Image (spheres, rainbow, N blue to C red):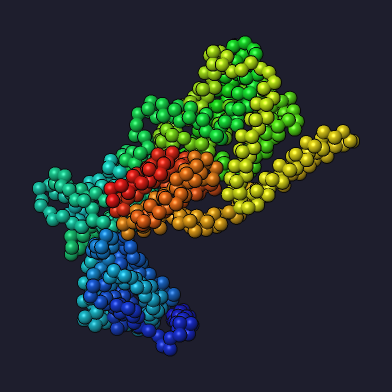
Amino acid sequence: MLLSIFNRTVFLASVLLMACWSGLSAAQETASGDHVKVRWLVPDTFGPGAETIGFYFEVDPGWHVYWRNAGDSGAAPRFDFAGATGEVGPIQWPFPVRLPIEHLTNLGYEGDVAYLFEVTPDAAAMDIVVNLEWLVCKVDCIPGYGIMTLSRPVDEAASWQPQDVQLRDRFLAMVPAEATAENFLWQVAAVAASPQAGTLQFELAPREAGVELSTPDVFPLDGGLLTAKAPEVAQAGENIRYTFERVPGAPMPPSTGFVVSDGERAWQLDDQEIQAGAASAAGAAVTMASATGPASTQPLWLLILAAIAGGAILNLMPCVFPVLSIKLFSLAGHDGQAAHRVKEGLRYAAGVLVTFAALGALLLVLRAGGSAIGWGFQLQSAPVVLGLILLFWVMALSFSGLYEFGHHLMNVAGRSRGGSFATGVLAVFVAAPCTGPFMGAALGAATLLPAYSAMAIFLGLGIGLALPFVLLCVFPALLNRLPAPGPWMETLRQALAFPLYATVIWLLWVLGRLVGESGWLIGAMLMLVIVFAFWLGRHGFRGSRWLAWGLVLAALVASFSAANRLQEQGVANGSVQQQEAAAGWQPYDRNAIAQALASGQAVFIDYTAAWCITCQVNKKLVLDTAEVADLFRDNDVYMVRADWTNQDPEITRALGELGRNSVPVYAWYPAGERTPVLLPQILQVSMIKDLFSEK
């Protein structure tokens, strides 16, 4: 008894505080808003045991409120129990109906509805205070808020008003029951991802063969996985097959749930396992990707050929050329025998293949551990980018003649026994930003295939990257076309410094995108200290070299620590997104994209990164031109720029669902469509025009 009095005192104090805070002069047993009135469905007196009570929503004609899965738009009501002297169970949802609103489909209730709860009072009284939030819609939607309180005595038995208990029982009969062999005439035959991209099939079979049953309605519990649109219904013998559309970009979970209704009663089927094989998470991703472009369902040999072609094309990319220029310069000046050149080519190929194998193994290990990363992940690290800036800056200064790099690091990357191997390693490391044609699909498939197949694709990329250089070494006739050594070599060496300087400038820009404007300052100050250290080391006063090495060490520690700290703080994220939004591009937001698609708006997603040169070229020449901007605006396209410069698990996951793990990727969702079309990695303005040619 003392405990009950204490509970009641605490409850009344909370009611009083909430009433004062909300400006109410007295406790409220009702709530109301535009087109909605809410009242309790409760007994006048509670019995000692559990009782089902409800919030009865009286909704104006033509308006509706929502189920637990609201569908393409809208929101389910919220009941926040701020205090109760008894126990309150979870909400019980009557089964819904589909509500087509123009091109959308909602799940909810036409007219009045009661949301139900099971409560158990304490020995003295049943007191409740609850905050309500709801959304009522016709075409436009209006939110509503309210605070409702309840205070009822407890007696030997519950005492109801007849009309209230009838309403309660009417909606209680609509609450889905657990499906059992005794009460459910159907059984689940299959829940599987369809071979058709972006769908999921749910199949019911009658428990007794030969019994004619009406076709029930099926509603998905997970609105993040399946759309609310009515599924396609087909007869498969005695079975009924429902084909639901998946929400674009939604990952396939191991299980999901449904509510099945015959219009009078309903049954809830929780945790229905999505079948393995074609219906597994990886299989679903492969299936969806196959309809949108990637070759993840192609034979392995074809994927390996695509990987070799993609690797070969990397040699033409500007991010690889500065590295190969070092070896090109070395070969042009070498007058040794063909056997030596073959060894150099094989060492270079070994460096490429070993590095590709190491990166592939790392990706597979991380994939097995549940991490989501992709090709080019090393350039999402500010310290790694700063290290490349330092390396290319030192190489460029050597090519310009500031000091003789050839006897030290140049020997590693140029003429020493390990030099060709080291050049191959470096070539792979900086090739990551240059995902070219054929390479994206092959890498995307590697993220989904078994480990041995994925590693074969990575080695295929390595073969393609190394092949042109090896051919140049193996066939002397190709080398003989190079001019004979002479004074021109010094001019060539100095000329080759400029691509290295250009690479340094580009990497400084990438660093700025990773850590903010301070990235330029950090990189530039490190470069200044390095040049000063070279100058100091060349002057022979006592201790100058020790002082130079001390300055370099201090600069390295300070700059790398600062870059890592600033990236962790995420300084650059806000400003980059604001700049993109100001230009009409929105940052990646899975929910915003789903809403745009649900409203019938066309969507264009640019998966990009600052360190991706192909991405930047496509931006400047195509996507950010006035002509393309006008096309997108005139056709009401929702433009999304998924910036992958920094590691973003959501974007990595979205790429994986498209069968890709590298950028650039351009996904086009035509108006009213939920399956994307993937554009080529090298864009042209004419390709964007073709997207609207049928209009």
Farthest right residue in view: 542
Q: Position of residue 595 (x, y in %)?
A: 36, 58
Q: Residue at x 60, y 15 (%)?
A: 341
Count of marks, rendered view? 0
Q: Can residue 368 be seen in this view?
A: yes
Q: Please state if 224 lies on the left or on the right of 474 as rendered.
A: left
Query: Residue 604's x, y, as percent?
Result: 39, 50
Q: Residue at x 31, y 53 (%)?
A: 671
Left or right: 278, with 483 as reference point:
left
Location of residue 165 with respect to 684 vertically, above or below: below
Can you say whether 392 is above or below 228 in the image?
A: above
Residue 651 percent across, percent down from the top left = 46, 48
Asked if residue 177 can be seen in this view, the reply is no
Viewed as shown, does residue 300 lie left or right of 41?
right
In the rendered image, which quarter is residue 391 located in? top right
Q: Please name whichever residue, 658 or 223, is drawn nearer the observer in this view of the structure.
A: 658
Quadrant of the frame with the N terminus? bottom left
> Nearest the camera: 571 or 55?
571
Q: Where is residue 589 in the image (x, y as percent from the top left)?
A: 44, 55
Locate residue 601: give its quadrant: bottom left
Foreground pick, 118 / 468: 468
Q: Residue at x 60, y 31 (%)?
A: 322
Residue occupying the point 63% across, 27% down: 326
Give the quarter of the image for residue 531.
top right
Q: Note whether 76 is above or below 274 in the view shown.
A: below
Q: Which of 508 and 459 is in front in this view?
A: 508
